[in-house]
Amino acid sequence: MSSLNKKQGDTSSGQRPNANDKDALVVHDLTKRYDETVALDGIDLAVADGEFVSVVGPSGCGKSTLLRVLSGLEERFSGRAVVDGEDVRDGGSDDVGMVFQEPRLLPWADVRENVAVGLPAGVDADDPKTATRIDDLIETVGLSGFEDHRPGGLSGGMAQRVSLARGLAYQPSVLLLDEPFSALDQLTKYEQQDNLLEVWEARGTTVVLVTHDIEEAAYLSDRVVVLGGQPGRVVEAVDVDIARPRRRTDEQLVAIREAITGALGV
Amino acid sequence: MATTGRTYTVGRAALPNADRFRWLLGLVVPAVLVVVWHLAVSVGVFAPHQLPEPLRVLTTFYGMAASGELWGHIAVTVQRVLFGVIIGVVVGVLFGTLTGYYRLANDLFDPLFQSMKNIPSLAWVPLFLLWFGIGESAKVLLIAVGAFFPVYLNLSTGIAGVSEDLLEVAAVYDLGRIEELRRVILPAALPSLLVGIRGGVGLAWMFVVAAELIAASQGIGFLLSDGRTLARPDIIIGSILLFAFFGNLSDLGVKEVEKRVITQ
């Protein structure tokens, strides 16, 4: 891996300076085509265990495609995508949980059952410990009291939190989030972002968040990877070295946001 | 102000009451028809040996019920429909799941079933009699054929139409084939299955008539053909009404199940 080392701020790579085999997620020279269209072109990215990385970019830059590759939904691509040392096509995707842009809950099942969908195979659903675990997760995302509700009776923000709890139930090495807050109003969005940070800090899960919201990326992440153009390429990686908890109005954040905006060429 | 409030309350309370009895309106036209029927026969528009008075139909069947003869016919027909529906639904669910879930199974079986569904029920009767004799199995299997197709077609389409979004969730969380089927696909296709079962039960009643008209010594369909042989229009009309009654009853039953199962 050392040959791939690039300096921070290098314009062609999302790799950190010290990428190594302990990384939870390593992507090397990933190229994904849909027939004639090249969606992703030579993406390099490494995410350390426990790191929070955001991927930003304009619409159609292949952000979502990247997550689909990592979660095993797209099996035909060239290059390497490795989670916990295992290629996503050889079961590496089993270590990945995904929160989609839409909640994608089972409409006929209650919150408890929807969260249980995320339980890894081999977990005994009838074990009382499993029930406690599910209820803990529901509490973690702040939905205690709604265990028996169906998705139809939940607001958009609540449904998205159920989706997050389902992703956490899976206990993934890497949790992928695909613009999970984009459909929420500003206030709910802030709440959900802070909720995600709390969960991330408490559980130490590695997080890769795809978003088009620069403010969101800067506020949440350890590092922001900027994708650009069509086909999607890594344009720049911006480290966010600001102590947590952060204030949304922090001036350093403004500088980071400007760096990201600059990289996007806006 | 107080008066307005009170009027409002009274109005709201009265409306649901009226709505609750609305279904009775559906009985008005049939009731008028019965009266017209009675008048037409008593005035002499129809000869009694072609169309008996309504009361005559009622007394004939009351007599048959009192002697116990009627219950035997009803029990036999209901039993045939029940067994036929059970077999048809089970086989329909099996093949519907298979073809809905596996592309290859769909390519192999679906064209055959699609073309077989257009064979009229009566066309099967001679073949089934030849194969299974005039016993119960021929009739039950014939009814099963009738019940099979709507169940198969609806479930197969329902499963094929399950949202790709939910299937991706099942894939990301590695549910595996069986769990995916149990927790995602079958619940999602349940409404389609119930529509299919309703159609299947309806066709089962059509097929039982076909079976009993041609080869039976008991059952409502036999009563129907017996009425023709004996030149007893009262028996024929009564049998038709019995079919109407039980057909509606079973349809209401499935509808009720539908309502309870699909609560979203």
Image (spheres, coloured by chain):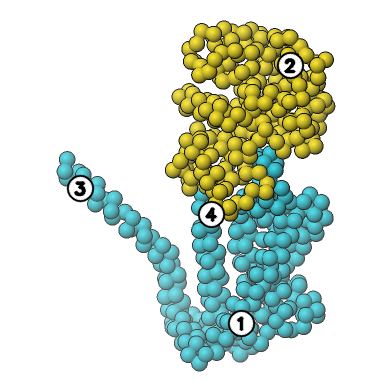
Residue drawn at (66%, 35%), measured in percent from left and top? A172
Residue B235 horizontal side relative to residue B39, left or right: right
Name the image quarter holding the N terminus of chain A: top right
- Camera-side residue: A222 or B63? A222
Label 4, label 3: how far apart the Cα atoms are? 38 Å
The chain identifier of the residue carrying mark 4 reads B
Q: Which chain is assigned yellow?
A: A
The label shown at residue B76 is: 1
C-alpha span from label 4 to label 1: 32 Å
- SS class, disc 4: loop
Dot 2 crowding, Cα within 10 Å, few <14, some 14–19, many 20+:
some
Give the quadrant of residue B97. bottom right
Q: Residue at position x 66%, y 44% from top?
A: A120
Looking at the rendered structure, whether the residues under marks 4 and 2 are on a common chain is answered as no
Whole-angstrom CA distance, mark 1 to mark 3, is: 58 Å
Task: Establish if B223 lies above or below B93.
Answer: below
Residue located 61% across and 90% down the image? B230
Check disc 2 and report the residue beneath it: A18
Residue toward you, B97 or A141: A141
